């Protein structure tokens, strides 16, 4: 039985999307050339991943000559938001605060990052208060 297609990106798909976000549009060959030597994959492997990304709705393809050119349909920020929502829903019971608490308690977060988070929280609270008025 086939697995249900995930709406999030795997590590390999993320590497391919990184190339597409950087280039805007790329062929299979372009994607292979843009990856680092230790992460190089076979042409057919990249082609398969691009087909999966197309099926998931992350990219679209257009034919140019004998090759297909792929371009992202989702911005990097939108993909990041989608992945974060998936993580919060699956690993933290839908609670963003549970994620934040986990980050503060169980990760190697330094004082600068904590201060940055505090500032972001203050800005979000200020925005919420002004939106409620």
Image (cartoon, grey):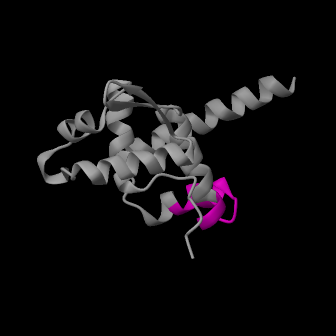
**Secondary structure, magenta segment, majority class:** helix
User: From the viewer's perspective, is residue 27 above or below residue 100?
Assistant: above
In screen coordinates, is 55 left or right of 44? right
In screen coordinates, is 122 left or right of 37? right
Q: Is residue 89 visible?
A: yes
Across and down, in percent, residue 8 comes to 53, 53
Residue range in magenta is: 89-102
Across and down, in percent, residue 87 comes to 57, 58
- The structure residue drawn at horizontal position 29% and vertical position 54%, both measured from the top left corner, is 45
Q: 36 and 126: which one is in front? A: 36
Residue 53 part of the magenta-drawn span: no
Residue 96 part of the magenta-drawn span: yes
- The structure residue drawn at horizontal position 57% and vertical position 55%, both measured from the top left corner, is 100
- The structure residue drawn at horizontal position 28% and vertical position 52%, both measured from the top left corner, is 44
Across and down, in percent, residue 93 comes to 69, 65
Residue at the limit of the structure toward the front, as seen here: 66
User: From the viewer's perspective, is residue 89 above or below residue 63?
Assistant: below
In screen coordinates, is 38 left or right of 61? left
Q: Is residue 110 visible?
A: no
In screen coordinates, is 47 left or right of 79? left
Asked where in the image residue 90 lies, by quadrant, the reply is: bottom right
The quadrant in which the N terminus is found is: bottom right
The quadrant in which the C terminus is found is: top right
Q: 65 and 68: which one is in front? A: 65
Q: 107 and 41: which one is in front? A: 41
Across and down, in percent, residue 11 comes to 37, 55
């Amino acid at each position: 039985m086939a697995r249900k297609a995930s709406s999030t990106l795997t590590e390999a798909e993320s590497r391919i999307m990184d190339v597409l976000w950087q280039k805007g549009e790329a062929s299979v060959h372009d994607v292979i050339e843009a990856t680092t030597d230790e992460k190089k994959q076979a042409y057919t492997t990249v082609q398969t991943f691009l087909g999966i990304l197309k099926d998931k709705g992350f990219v679209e393809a257009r034919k140019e000559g004998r090759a297909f050119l792929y371009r992202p349909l989702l911005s990097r920020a939108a993909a990041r938001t989608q992945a974060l929502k998936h993580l919060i829903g699956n690993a933290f019971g839908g609670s963003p605060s549970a994620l934040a608490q986990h980050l503060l308690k169980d990760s190697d977060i330094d004082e600068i990052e904590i201060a940055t988070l505090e500032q972001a929280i203050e800005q979000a609270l200020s925005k919420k208060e002004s939106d409620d008025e």
